[in-house]
Image (spheres, rainbow, N blue to C red):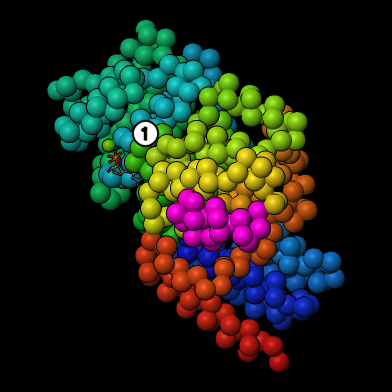
């Protein structure tokens, strides 16, 4: 997710790392690169200006320059400001009232409304809600059919009224039906247009006024960048939006829309869509996202994902082992195996602190295959090596690599991942949400999440495992620029 933004910010912050001493001028130089990365990611100009103003004011303050670890402090400032930009440290809660709750999804055509109806149903059913969908997009006959297919797939009832011309009537009847069936959440799938037009807005306003939904969500396509931000503004002027759902943040999305939309419209982001599958919807947590963007990881998000993937019995066993201070490579392997589901691995890796390199290494192959490869590496280890990975020296590494048919470098990457995971897993064991947060903060303070420490790429790595050569070229170019800049800056 947002790979080029991540790389840009990491390189920017890395320039600070190399300095023996932070001065106002070399700090400004590093911050200039932060600004450049944001602009390249298509974050709105005003938003960038504001953001940089706040970061600079804090970062060039005397306290930071005198601090023992000024780079860490600057990373912390950028992180805090990113969190603010994304909506503050709030938890993504949607309050459900007793009885029927009505959600209305609106947005331009193709933004992902119908798909998101299915994704929301999946999430809601996981928390034991009784869900019903309402086909209120009467613009295209195929839209009703599409919703029925999704409903069937998930086992969710879909209300539709063939032949009816007025979406308000369809919604009203759906409400009656939902009440009869003790449904707790009814989701209205409304029509979209290719662009904002008055007729569409009038129709949506009519539904809003007459059906009185409890939550009105706007679904926006994150790939459309600043257009998404503009359309969010227009929709929010017409309807009072309760939240945004930004879709298509998987793939090559640059991230500008996500970083701009909250500040420009004031509407909170509630969920993000990260794939076409009906389970690819995540509650949006600004802190986790800021961590992911900066390569600091999103440990809370990771815990959620693991929880939803691993069965309860297994999770309990794992917690018990962790509480006893054991987390061996065998446990790691078990965990890898339990998350051998399409797409899940990549998602998890993206949430691990400092795991950018491993994610890239795996992005050339299918993620499942990648996880199998890691399992294969662990399989080539002796029981002793799995229990005490510290004993794996160069010789052992080469033997393991030969056994698993991989490069020794991959064994290293695996161990690095394990070494990052193990202390986190140990600290997480048996903690409530609050305790987890405290544990993460402690790890952060201890420098375990220091992105600079994880930045160095192995020498002689040609990057041939990258999915596309362009990525490698881009990185080389950026590094070259950075070197040039550094040479120039060191007078
Ligand atoms: N990659 C990706 N595709 C998505 C996502 N959400 C929706 N889509 C795709 O976007 C297209 C339009 O979605 P649809 O739900 O029909 O949009 P609607 O016109 O707003 O109802 C479909 O091909 C979906 O599979 C997402 O989060 N990621
Ligand atoms: Mg639709």
Q: Is residue 400 magenta?
A: yes
Q: Which residues are magenta?
A: 392-412
Which quadrant does the C terminus fall into? bottom right
Q: Is residue 62 above or below residue 309?
A: below
Tag count in the figure?
A: 1
Q: Is residue 145 left or right of residue 179?
A: left
Give the camera-side residue of 271 and 136. 271
In this view, which residue lies farthest toward the top? 180
Q: Residue at x 64, y 68 (%)?
A: 13
Give the residue number, with chain letter if any, for mark 1: 278
Residue 353 in view here: no
- Please state the quadrant of the image where ligand 1 appears: top left
* Place of residue 298 in the rendered image (x, y in percent of width and height, measured from the top left): 60, 46
Residue 153 x %, y %: 29, 25
Outermost residue to the bottom: 491
Q: Does residue 456 sit above or below 212 in this rendering? A: below
The residue carrying pointer 1 sits among few (fewer than 14), some (14 to 19) or many (20 or more) residues within 10 Å by Cα, namely many
Q: Going 61% across and 68% down the picture, which residue do you hit?
A: 456
| Magenta portion: prevailing SS class | helix
Residue 446: in sight, yes or no? yes
Q: Nearer the viewer, residue 283 or 250?
A: 250
Helix, strand or loop at label 1? It is loop
Q: Is residue 142 magenta?
A: no
Going by the image, does 293 lie left or right of 272?
A: right
Work out whether 212 lies above or below 370. Answer: above
Q: Position of residue 235 (x, y in %)?
A: 39, 45
Q: Is 92 displayed left or right of 428 in the figure? A: left
Q: Nearer the viewer, residue 283 or 356?
A: 356
Question: For residue 139, what is the image quadrant?
Answer: top left
Image-based side of 463 in relation to 331, left or right: left
């Amino acid at each position: 997710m947002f790979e080029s933004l991540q790389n840009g910010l990491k390189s920017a912050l890395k320039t600070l790392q190399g300095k023996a001493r932070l001065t106002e001028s070399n700090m400004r130089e590093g911050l200039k690169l932060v600004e450049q990365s944001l602009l390249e990611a298509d974050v709105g100009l005003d938003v960038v200006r504001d953001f940089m103003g706040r970061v600079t004011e804090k970062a060039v303050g005397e306290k930071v320059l005198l601090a023992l670890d000024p780079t860490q402090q600057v990373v912390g400032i950028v992180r805090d400001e990113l969190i603010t930009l994304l909506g503050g440290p709030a938890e993504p809660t949607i309050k459900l009232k007793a009885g029927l709750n009505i959600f209305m999804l609106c947005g331009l055509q193709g933004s992902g409304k119908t798909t998101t109806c299915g994704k929301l149903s999946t999430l809601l059913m996981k928390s034991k809600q009784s869900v019903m969908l309402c086909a209120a997009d009467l613009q295209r006959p195929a839209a009703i059919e599409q919703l029925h297919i999704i409903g069937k797939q998930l086992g969710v009832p879909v209300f539709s009224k063939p032949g009816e011309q007025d979406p308000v009537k369809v919604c009203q009847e759906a409400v009656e039906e939902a009440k009869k069936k003790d449904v707790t959440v009814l989701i209205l799938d409304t029509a979209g247009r290719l662009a904002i037009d008055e007729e569409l807005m009038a129709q949506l306003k009519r539904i809003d006024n007459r059906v009185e939904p409890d939550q009105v969500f706007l679904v926006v396509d994150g790939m459309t960048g600043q257009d998404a931000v503009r359309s969010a503004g227009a929709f929010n002027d017409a309807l009072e939006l309760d939240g945004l759902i930004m879709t298509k943040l998987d793939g090559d999305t640059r991230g500008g829309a996500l970083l701009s939309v909250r500040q420009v419209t004031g509407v909170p982001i509630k969920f993000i869509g990260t794939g076409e599958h009906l389970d690819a919807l995540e509650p949006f947590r600004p802190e986790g996202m800021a961590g992911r963007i900066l390569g600091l990881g999103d440990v809370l998000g990771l815990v959620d994902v693991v929880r939803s993937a691993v069965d309860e019995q297994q999770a309990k066993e794992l917690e018990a082992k962790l509480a006893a201070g054991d987390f061996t490579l065998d446990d790691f392997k078990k965990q890898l195996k339990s998350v051998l589901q399409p797409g899940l691995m990549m998602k998890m890796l993206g949430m691990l602190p400092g795991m950018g390199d491993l994610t890239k290494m795996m992005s050339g192959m299918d993620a499942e295959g990648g996880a199998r490869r890691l399992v294969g590496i662990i399989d080539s280890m002796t029981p002793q090596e799995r229990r005490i990975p510290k004993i794996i020296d160069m010789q052992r590494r080469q033997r393991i690599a030969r056994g698993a048919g991989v490069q020794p470098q991959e064994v290293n990457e695996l161990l690095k991942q394990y070494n990052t995971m193990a202390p986190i897993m140990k600290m997480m064991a048996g903690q409530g949400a609050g305790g987890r947060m405290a544990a993460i903060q402690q790890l952060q303070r201890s420098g375990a999440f220091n992105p600079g420490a994880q930045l160095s790429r192995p020498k002689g790595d040609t990057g041939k495992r990258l999915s596309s050569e362009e990525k490698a070229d881009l990185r080389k170019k950026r590094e070259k620029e950075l070197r040039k800049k550094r040479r120039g800056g060191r007078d």
